[in-house]
Image: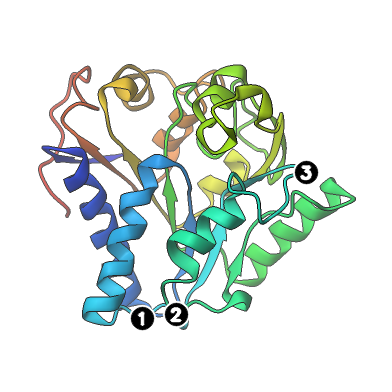
Amino acid sequence: MHLLRTPREAQAAVLAAELIARELVLNPRLVLGLATGRTMEPVYAHLVRLHRETGLDFSRCRTFNLDEYVGLPFSHPGSYHHYMEERLFMPVNLRPEQVALPDGLAADLPAACRRYEALIEAAGGIDLLLLGLGQTGHIGFNEPPAAFEARTHEAQLLPLTRKQNADPFGGSARAVPATALTMGIGTILEARRCLLLVTGARKAAVLAQVLEGPVTPLLPGSALQRHPDCQVVVDEAAVAQIRQPGDAGPS
């Protein structure tokens, strides 16, 4: 993994957005995997700014989101359909047929997972996959212990994850759905390139384990050590506990 350090959280988000924008300019038909959560909000804000100010064009790309809650209406403020519509899809020139998210409202969830995998395959696979890191070590909603060969599947969410995601649910962890559909680790590792964005002191301990610890299903993010092209964008607070200094900027 290739570490890209920035002094502060805001700069890390801008760097992640600039890396995505660069890939989109180089390949307008980019197949882009997308993450959600508070860490990603300034990334999407900067991409929207680039679209409005520089004409960054999304009209020929495809997007696939990592995950979606099970049983949550798409209009719910906590759904990732709603999150993405508000923060990226509507503000830029992405058409509905260009975007895809797992269908957490499907009557047959295993079939919906298989369809999602088929859509990714039909698109030629994911070129660049944006990832965040949960405090349980999860990427996507692959909670520990995570099967490294898993494809898109229904995942049980740990109490800590539900607590961390409670804001759009009135602050109640109990209101957060207990399960979600998520790309599996096997799906994630097949992306041609991964971009992991981690910021803040609260992620320092788990990030140090992901970067420097053993590769283990008990720490799902550690699977990224096996990826041949993974960039990790961080701020100084997030890397406070790592032993290696890493790099100062993009290669």
Estimate how packed mark 1 is, as few (under 14), some (14 to 19) or many (20 or more) residues with alpha carbons within 10 Å: some
The image quadrant that residue 142 belongs to is: top right
Of residue 35 and residue 194, the one placed in the foreground of this image is 35
Of residue 171 and residue 156, the one placed in the foreground of this image is 171
Three-letter amino acid code at disc 2?
Asn
Closer to viewer: mark 2 or mark 1: 2
Q: Could you tell me residue 27's position as x and y percent? A: 37, 77
Three-letter amino acid code at disc 3?
Gly
Q: Residue at x 36, y 41 (%)?
A: 39
Three-letter amino acid code at disc 1?
Asp
Give above or below for 176 relative to 103.
above
Q: Which mark is residue 57?
A: 1
- Mark 3: secondary structure: loop
**Do residues under tags 1 and 3 come within 8 Å of each other at their CB atoms?**
no
Q: Could you tell me residue 12's position as x and y percent? A: 22, 45
Q: Residue at x 54, y 27 (%)?
A: 171
Asked whether the viewer can see residue 173, the reply is yes
User: Would you name the residue on which mark 2 appears?
Assistant: 93
